[in-house]
Image: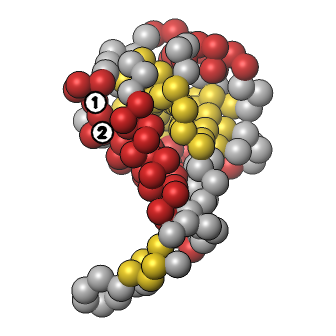
């Protein structure tokens, strides 16, 4: 089970990047997305709409407390930040764990997140986005096998095509 916890979403400022974090998480093998901060029903509807159209069993919901979500989680907590250990140095240890919660920032990340996380992981020590952190972490975690995943259910499939769109409506 891989959960992605988005910290302190701001409805007017973060809706696009938060949606992209969730979509990257879904496409690359996460099971759940938890939105904290503003309860943005539009973002959650958009994510659920993708699941309906393209399939899979990805869950997305809002929680009023990131702290409670972390406290009740029984696996390891991995905070994705540019101030942490290098992902390539610790991914082997993390991969051994059954349940992982990825924590990605929004507005300023509380210092408590750094303290309570089992790992503070840097995909790179340069400024970049939460989307790239989630994508690169999940790719390393799954050894690129997530690129071959299938998503049961859904209304459509996209067939790989050298040029043009090849959409199959189910």
Which residue, given by chain and number where applicable, does mark 2 sit on? 17
Q: Nearer the viewer, residue 165 or 94?
A: 165
Q: Position of residue 106 (x, y in %)?
A: 35, 25
Which residue, given by chain and number where applicable, does mark 1 sit on? 14
Disc 1 crowd, CA 10 A, few/some/many (<14, 14-19, 20+): some
In the visual, does 138 lie left or right of 118?
left
Disc 2 crowd, CA 10 A, few/some/many (<14, 14-19, 20+): some
The answer to whether residue 117 of the structure is visible from this angle is yes
Q: Position of residue 19 (x, y in %)?
A: 36, 42
Q: Work out how far the residue at label 2 is from the one at label 1, CA to CA, in angstroms.
A: 6 Å
Q: Position of residue 110 (x, y in %)?
A: 43, 11
Query: What residue is drawn where x is 68% and y is 49%?
Result: 95
In the visual, does 66 lie left or right of 12?
right
In the visual, does 70 lie left or right of 111?
right
Quarter that holds the N terminus: top right
The figure's colour scheme reads secondary structure
């Amino acid at each position: 089970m891989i959960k992605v916890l988005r910290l302190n979403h701001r409805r007017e400022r973060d809706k696009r990047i938060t949606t992209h974090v969730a979509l990257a998480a879904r496409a690359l093998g996460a099971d759940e997305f938890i939105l904290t901060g503003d309860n943005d029903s539009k973002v959650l509807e958009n994510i659920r709409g993708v699941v309906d159209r393209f399939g899979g069993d990805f869950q997305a919901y809002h929680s009023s407390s990131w702290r409670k979500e972390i406290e009740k989680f029984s696996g390891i907590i991995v905070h994705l930040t540019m101030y942490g250990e290098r992902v390539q140095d610790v991914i082997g240890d993390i991969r051994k764990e059954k349940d992982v919660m990825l924590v990605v920032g929004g507005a300023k990340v509380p210092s408590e997140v750094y303290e309570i996380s089992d790992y503070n992981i840097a995909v790179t020590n340069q400024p970049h986005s939460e989307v790239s952190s989630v994508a690169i972490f999940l790719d390393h975690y799954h050894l690129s096998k997530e690129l071959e995943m299938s998503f049961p259910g859904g209304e459509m499939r996209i067939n790989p095509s050298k040029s043009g769109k090849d959409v199959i409506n189910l």
